[in-house]
Image (cartoon, helix red, strand yellow):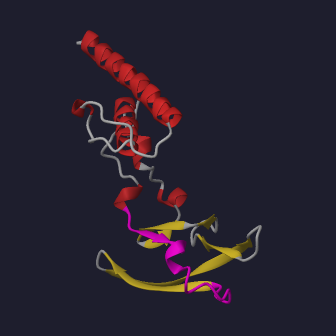
């Protein structure tokens, strides 16, 4: 049974990305970030520990250590305190989609890449200037296959009723 689409997902939580602190962490001396904020009427003040890993071509990549489970993460989500996605026990929005919604999302992604209007009723457009013909043909082939799957899914739904 697919998950209910109204279940909480990660888009319901405010995000804290390590990338937004890149300039502050450039010198490499910080080993924690001090957090002071108010969330849903409660005030929070605590430190989030940081770790870093060496990159192949020099420098370091910084990570948050989840205050709850101590896993190394690049993004934390606010559920009172900032914790990782595993500790929030919430899913990505795409994990809650029905299979037909997934088809629509992929079709719209292809249409956006081709510079066409979003929505399957908008029809086809032109090949974008500068796009290789083979890339365009591969995208059209995938688009047509997805449209066939979408039509097949609607036929199944109509046959059930």
Q: Is residue 20 magenta?
A: yes
Residue at the spot x=50%, y=30% of the render?
Answer: 138
Image position of 10 with respect to 33: above or below: above
Percent across and percent down for residue 144 are 40, 24
Depth order, front residue of 128/2 = 128
Query: Residue furthest toward the top?
Result: 159
Q: Quadrant of the C terminus?
A: top left
Q: Is 62 left or right of 78, judged from the image as shown?
A: right
Marks counted in the figure total: 0
Percent across and percent down for residue 156 are 32, 14
> Picture quarter containing residue 117?
top left
> Picture quarter containing residue 115?
top left
Percent across and percent down for residue 110 are 40, 39
Q: Is residue 18 magenta?
A: yes
Residue at the spot x=39%, y=21% of the render?
Answer: 149
> Picture quarter containing residue 47?
bottom right
Percent across and percent down for residue 135 are 51, 36
Q: Is 117 left or right of 108, judged from the image as shown?
A: left
Residue at the spot x=45%, y=46% of the render?
Answer: 130
Depth order, front residue of 156/5 = 156
Depth order, front residue of 122/66 = 122
Q: Which residues are magenta?
A: 13-31
Q: Quadrant of the N terminus?
A: top left
Q: Is 65 left or right of 34, judged from the image as shown?
A: right
Image position of 71 with respect to 32: above or below: above
Residue at the spot x=42%, y=29% of the render?
Answer: 140
């Amino acid at each position: 049974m697919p998950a209910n689409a109204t279940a909480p997902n990660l888009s319901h939580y405010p995000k804290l990305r390590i990338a937004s602190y890149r300039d502050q962490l450039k010198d490499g001396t910080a080993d924690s970030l001090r957090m002071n904020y108010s969330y849903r009427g409660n005030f929070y003040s605590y430190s989030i520990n940081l770790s870093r890993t060496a990159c192949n071509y020099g420098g370091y990549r910084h990570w948050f250590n989840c205050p709850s489970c101590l896993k190394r993460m690049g993004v934390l989500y606010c559920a009172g305190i900032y914790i990782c996605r595993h500790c929030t026990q919430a899913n990505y929005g795409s994990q809650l989609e029905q299979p037909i919604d997934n088809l629509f999302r992929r079709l719209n992604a292809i249409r956006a890449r081709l510079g066409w209007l979003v929505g399957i009723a908008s029809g086809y457009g032109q090949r974008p200037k500068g796009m290789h013909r083979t890339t365009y043909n591969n995208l059209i082939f995938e688009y047509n296959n997805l449209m066939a799957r979408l039509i097949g899914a609607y036929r199944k739904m109509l046959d059930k009723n």
